Image (cartoon, helix red, strand yellow):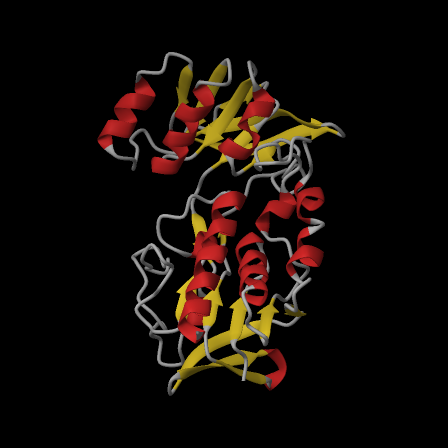
Amino acid sequence: MLDLAIIGGGPAGLTAGLYATRGGLKNVVMFEKGLPGGQIMNSSEVENYPGVKEILTGMELMAPWPEQCMRFGLKHEMIEVERVEKSGEHFKILLAGGKEEMAKNVIICTGSTPKRAGFEGEDEFFGKGVSTCATCDGFFYKDKEVAVLGGGDTALEEAIYLSNICSKVYLIHRRDAFRAAPSTVEHMKAKENIELVLNSSVKKVYGDAMGVTGVLTVDKEGNERDLNVPGIFTFVGMNVNNDVLMQEDGTSLCTLNDRGEMIVDLSMNTDVEGLFAAGDIRIQAAKQVVCASSDGAVAALQVIAREH
């Protein structure tokens, strides 16, 4: 019987493991089907993690985390978790290959995955001019022109954020109306350096070995426009990684909101005793490494209090 099962090995899961084991829990396993590190591993440059003054790649930032977080006894099982079920007062962890584990407590740290827009060159230049995080990468385009793709709250908010850093922001949206809140739309339209490229989609991005050098858009009439920008930020939604919560009968192990995010309180408690969430999988997540790490620490401290 595990004292704690941690599902997911990004910043939230690793920090939860560090705090849980350092806090005295003896049998803690982090289930992560790949190498620990999380979504930030895809970032080409990180300069906003507190206490790290050097500009690092996501892989460089996360490289020392597993060793530090496993120093006090955290174990990493490189296996996929298929489902988490309630079994009496405890939890059953169903693993790939028909394996099972039982745990007293579970912290879900599976995060979310930005949806890909599907244009040509998106995968090739991801992390080299194609980004899904303006607060992570926006500063690298200071006083330059950039493009933003999307029409929801996140896209407009990030366009506004980038307009304070960049000389110009092209906001590309496939419609002529926005899904964002009216106040956000008004704020965006008040920005003189945001140019709307409406009823249009991105056909492709192109560039060289250094990264993106341009974005080709096409409107509904088939007219193409070439934007000479070194970067594009895509905000076409997120896929919450909540598959492990889905039960055989189609219900969820705990209550989710309409976007599939786990509903938690300020202590990362769900409405199922012993089940916690941390990082991007939870409601109102800031989607920053430092915030996910904080969530993991909070959740682990709750487990320690519960076990002692």
* Residue 128 x/y as whole percent: 66, 33
The C terminus lies in quadrant: bottom left
- Residue 237 sits above or below residue 189 on the image: below
Q: Nearer the viewer, residue 112 or 210?
A: 112
The answer to whether residue 173 is visible is no
Extreme-bottom residue of the structure: 88
Extreme-left residue of the structure: 182
Residue at position x 52%, y 38% from top? 132
- Residue 220 sits above or below residue 306 on the image: above
Q: Nearer the viewer, residue 300 or 258?
A: 300
* Residue 203 x/y as whole percent: 54, 33
The N terminus lies in quadrant: bottom right
Which quarter of the figure has residue 29? bottom right
Residue at position x 48%, y 50% from top? 294
Residue at position x 40%, y 48% from top? 285
* Residue 62 x/y as whole percent: 66, 48
Q: Is residue 172 left or right of residue 215?
A: left
Which quarter of the figure has residue 91? bottom left
Residue at position x 47%, y 60% from top? 241
